[in-house]
Amino acid sequence: MGAREAGCFDSPAFGMDNILATRKHAVLVARGEQLRINLLAYHGGEAYITERLSRWPSESDVDFSGDAGQPLNEHRFYNNGTSATLGRLQRAFLNNYALRIATKINQYVFQSQPARKGIDVPWALDVTRTGMSLNQFMGEVSGLLTAGRWCWVGVDRPSTQGPRSRAAVESSGDRVYWQLYDPIEVVDWALDAKGNLAWLLLEREEYTNADPRTAAHSEKCRYLYEPGKVTRLVFDDKKKDFSTATESASGYNGVPFVPIGIPSSASWWFDDVERIQRSIMDLHSSLDTAIFKTVFPSLVVSESFRNAFTGDKIEANEVRRKVGMGHPFFETPEEKSITRWLTPTTADLKFIREEIDRRQSDLYDIVGLAMKVPESRQVASAEAKQWDHLDTEAVLAERATVLEEAELKLVELSRAIGGPIFHPYAPTYAKKFDLTDFSADIAAITQAGGLTLPPEGEKLLAKAALRSAAKRFNIPDAELQPAIKAVDTYEPPAFPPELSRLPPSDETDAQV
């Protein structure tokens, strides 16, 4: 909050056993590790792969993690100038279904832009003081709700000085702004008898590079928010305690945070999404490795071959580097020392691809998006499709309601903190969503066009086709409406009546 420093917080409580350095809410004790994994899945990338790629039983270090290799004298370098063997961990890749699900939910929820009557447009274009618009901000909120069930938004104001002109306020940067915190960053909190926040403790890693002549540095900090004040606590790198603690007045007689969603120690459906995504990643890695091992067959060598290396006192890693990553099979003299290659068949690899497809289908079914999978659209009955739509629309309507109510609370808190410099507004989110499929729409319209319909019915079908095409090709409403109006005045050309019979084919038929 507004940093009117009240002085250094000097208290006997700040000792080696300071509870503020270690305390954590019971909900986070139960859910913290899974929330961390869910957020890794949501962001994806190398960090998630490194954390969640499964290692096979008895898999060697070289096969899984690779081999850094030896320096090369030529210009063929790998990263740090070494010849390296990539392990399965380095070859693994991620199809981030978790992020795609969260993004798809956001696309539907924000399909129609929320109405915000009375909003200050310049503020809406930068609600964080870092250039993030209000729609982007609420999209990030929705993504964290998908991944973790809840998140937190803090409302802040850099200055709490007395009344000034609007020009003076704008020139000084005095404004209300919002900050988003994931569920792990707020480590502890308490509610009073009225259900309001009594205090809140958050933890962040802060990066500072304000002075170009001073080396940048990072600090691990905790902030204790209490009514009317906030205390900044900086961790000591060598001790499990704080090196400094500074208390400042906040200018607001309350705790300026809004919880969005409901903190709970119960499991969340995104936990299952992450587990299925992990299993799909493991299957992709298994398929990739199976292809590698199929394309590059396994070598079978004689026992004397190994003994020759042993006699030269060459280490096992050097043998592996000379022969290859695949461990060769060694034969005894009784097996006549026949050297050959064992090549696996590729015919049985298709079951892995089939299993990946099946788990993808299960994954979308969990979140009520089964109708987005092409196979389900082809085989599902009309009744099943209707249930799919109801399931998905219920998920989206619930999310829109949560976001709308959260934004209302944030507007009210911003008004209380900002006073006249904040313009309150009323957000309204759409609760109905277009979940139709363009191909299915056109097929249904074409099928209905084969019926005998009055001119009014034919015009309704024409309008439906225009609306579906407009959604598919992003045609602006201003261009769509004239085309729809033209349908009412359009008169199709008259067709000649059908002939009762074919004309005679020759003179004989004509005489008859």
Image (spheres, rainbow, N blue to C red):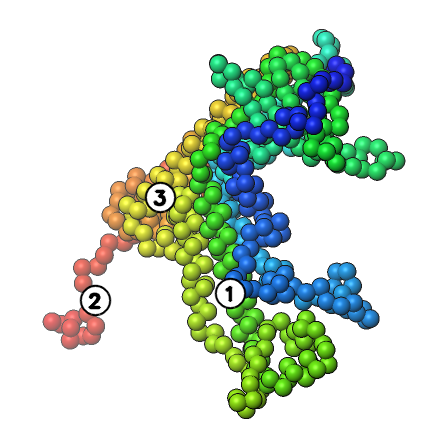
Q: Which residue is drawn at 20% across and 65% down?
A: 502
380, above or below 202, in the image: below
Q: For the N terminus, give its image quadrant.
A: top right
Q: In this view, does 318 lie to the left or right of 143?
A: right
Mark 3 vs mark 1: in front: 1
Q: Give the labeled residue for mark 2.
A: 503
Residue 304 pos. (x, y %) = 63, 86
User: Residue 90 in the image: x percent, y percent?
Assistant: 63, 60
Write down the residue under mark 3: 388
Amino acid at the residue labelled 1: Leu
- On-image quarter of the C terminus: bottom left
* Upstream in sequence: badge 3 or badge 1: 1
Residue sitting at 47 percent across and 43 percent down?
271
Q: Is residue 139 left or right of residue 210?
A: left
Q: Classify 432 as above or below 359.
A: above
Callout 2 crowding tier (Cα within 10 Å): few <14, some 14–19, many ≥20: few
Give the secondary structure at mark 2: loop
Q: Which residue is drawn at 62% across and 49% down?
A: 47
Q: What element carries label 1?
A: helix
Helix, strand or loop for disc 3: helix
What residue is pinned by disc 1?
Answer: 287
Q: Position of residue 461 (x, y in %)?
A: 34, 43
